[in-house]
Image: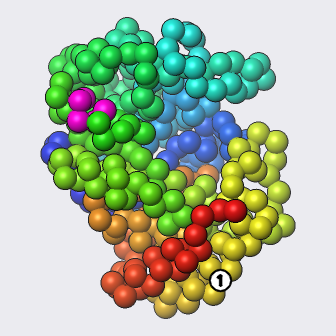
Amino acid sequence: MIYRRLGESDIEVSAVIFGAWAIGGWWWGDTDDELAIEAIRAAVDGGITTIDTAPMYGFGHSEEVVGRAVKGIADKVVLATKCGLVWSRTDGEYFFETPDPQGRTVPIYRVLKKDSIIAECEASLSRLGVDCIDLYQCHWMDSTTALEETMEALVTLRDQGKIRAIGLSNFTPEAIEQCAGYGPIAGHQPKFSLLDRQNLDGVISFTHSRGIGTIVYSPLEQGMLTGKVTMDREFPEGDYRAGQPWFRPANRRRVLDVLQTQIDPIARAHGATLSQVAIAWTVGAPGITAAIVGARNGEQARANAAGADVPLTEPEREEILRAFEALGDPE
């Protein structure tokens, strides 16, 4: 496993981070808590020291599962969670509607007001079972709240010892720069994968130039780059991937063709899986500190951890990139 300093903070993260979205049981179909705990512990045993979650992942359920998994070993892992997506108040920026655990449709708002962030942090600390969150990230921007107020809340939490470092997610370069004027930003979390590279020359390049770390999410494009989402794959009700462009049959066929004909030979040469090649390519891309990869069981977690160590050569990296550049955008 590769370990890297997150920006200019004192936090060291593993190049592969355990992503706890799916284990929250929200938008990914059902989940098994015991398998999820097994997956987290297997990830830690495999060298993954960092776990990323959020209250929105299952309305707090993901954080609760993570808390159970790291009980007794929390001092050995870096815990990253988020704030800013709430279902208990409506005084921010409306985002979307989604079923809650009781099946009721509830509106989700982006709220980064000071009192909301303080309350969210307390709830996350309780669910995670810790006294301090290592990396506390704003999940999405809230256009109704001044960045100064948001940062005031985060700096207060840091000064109180309830969080170690401040992070952002899905922010624009302009907003990141403004936030940095009110306090140190350790990292930013944008979307990035071989199928979605637009942020590489944009916000990723920007944050790298400012000494801010980058933790990317969806490096496997919600499983599409694993090669396991075959043409006969059907998604259960509640799995949001069914409506995503790359998962449409025609686009899925195109991706599978590239994986089978151009990427699989490289994977075989290294004794690796398609997922591991995608992970290795991602964590080796310019300006990227780490990549968040989800797992539902121990076997997946151990395989993901090994992805950081696949020694892709520069010619192989270029060949992989050319293959996906030629694929173009989803139709």
> Which quadrant, please, contains the C terminus?
bottom right
- Is 251 magenta? The answer is no
Residue that appears at 78% across and 23% down: 103
Q: Which residue is mark 1?
A: 260
**Looking at the image, how many numbered discs can be counted on the residues?**
1
Q: Name the image colouring.
A: rainbow
x, y percent for residue 111? 46, 18
Q: Is residue 128 visible?
A: yes
Q: Is residue 248 above or below residue 52?
A: below
Residue that appears at 36% across and 39% down: 172
> Which quadrant, please, contains the N terminus?
bottom left
Q: Is residue 161 left or right of residue 315?
A: left
Q: Is residue 17 left or right of residue 243?
A: left
Q: Is residue 298 left or right of residue 207?
A: right
Residue that appears at 60% across and 42% down: 23
x, y percent for residue 282? 41, 65
Secondary structure that dominates the magenta span: helix
Relative depth, front residue between 241 and 145: 145
x, y percent for residue 197? 46, 61
Image-quadrant location for residue 173: top left
Q: Is residue 62 above or below residue 232?
A: above
Q: Which residues are magenta?
A: 175-179
Residue that appears at 76% across and 50% down: 242
Q: Amino acid at mark 1?
A: Gln
Helix, strand or loop under label 1: helix
Q: Is residue 17 above or below residue 197?
A: above
Image-quadrant location for residue 262: bottom right
